[in-house]
Amino acid sequence: MGRCASHPDRETPYQCMKHGVFMCEQCFRCRDPELYCKHRTACPIHFLQKSRKRRDAEADRARG
């Protein structure tokens, strides 16, 4: 656990393994989505961001 880089008052388990930065759920996003990252397959931020995008796309399809 660590403190969010953008919100130091928030404890978070989400850490960018490539940059060593902690991010809360509000902030997490891949900092270099187009660049190679050897940690991506084990990165919770990458998977949560991917899941969020998929969920948003499904909601958009359901609406329209």
Image (cartoon, rainbow, N blue to C red):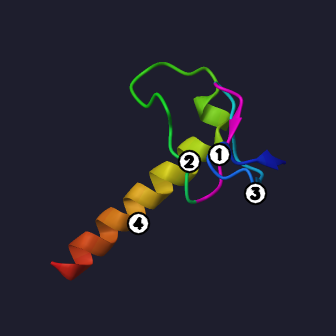
User: Chief secondary structure of the magenta span?
Assistant: loop
Task: State the residue in front, 52 or 8.
Answer: 8
Label 4 CA crowd tier, 10 Å (few <14, some 14–19, many 20+): few
Q: Earlier in the sequence, mark 3 or mark 2?
A: 3
Res 44 label: 1
- Identify residue for label 2: 47
Give the CA separation, mark 3 to mark 2: 24 Å
- The residue that appears at 43% across and 31% down in the rendered structure is 33
Q: Residue at x 30, y 63 (%)?
A: 57
The kind of residue tagged 2 is Phe
Q: Mark 4 sits on what residue? A: 55
In front: label 4 or label 3? 3
Range drawn in magenta: 19-25
Q: Position of residue 35 (x, y in %)?
A: 44, 20
Mark 3–mark 1 Cα distance, whole angstroms, equals 21 Å
SS under mark 1: helix
At 56% from the left and 53% from the top, the residue drawn is 48
- Taking depth in this image into account, of 25 and 42 the one nearest to the observer is 25
Q: Give the residue type at disc 3.
A: Asp
Q: Which image quadrant for residue 25?
A: bottom right
Looking at the image, the residue that sits furthest to the left is 64
- Give the numbered dot on residue 9: 3
Between the residue at mark 2 and the residue at mark 1, the CA separation in whole angstroms equals 5 Å
Q: Of marks 4 and 3, which one's residue comes earlier in the chain?
A: 3
Residue 23 screen position, x and y as percent: 65, 47
Which amino acid lies under the numbered mark 1 shown in the image of this protein? Pro
